[in-house]
Amino acid sequence: MSDDDTPSSAPFAPVDPRLLEILVCPVTKQPLIYDRERNELISKAAGLAYPIRDGIPIMLPDEARKLDDA
């Protein structure tokens, strides 16, 4: 059995700042806020936080965390 999970202690891959400038929430089409500590893109309008994995924003609403989730 192989372990494909990334170790939780792995550092976050940086996100290209130019990419952050053009990305918008796929639900509301509003700008996103980069949360460096949680490595997420926040859409306040939709109440969602999109994860960033290996430097790639995962812009799927089904993959997003609801902001009221702790």
Image (cartoon, rainbow, N blue to C red):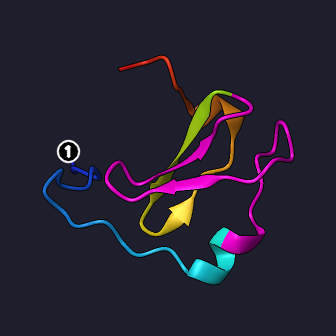
The three-letter amino acid code for the residue at tag 1 is Met
Residue found at x 85% / y 38%: 28
Over which residues does the magenta segment extend? Answer: 21-46
With 58 as the anchor, is 65 left or right in this view? Answer: left
Residue sitting at 44 percent across and 58 percent down? 53
| Residue 45 in the image, given as x and y percentages of width and height | 74, 33
Judge whether 36 appears above or below 18 on screen: above
Was residue 29 drawn as part of the magenta stretch in this picture?
Answer: yes
The residue indicated by pointer 1 is 1
Query: How far from the left and from the top, in percent, is residue 18?
Result: 66, 82
- Residue appearing at x 27%, y 49% in the figure: 5
- Please, which residue is most extreme toward the left here? 9
Q: Residues within 10 Å of mark 1 (few under 14, many from 20)?
A: few
Please tell me which residue lies in front, 10 or 31: 31
Q: Which quadrant holds the C terminus?
A: top left
Predominant secondary structure, magenta span: loop
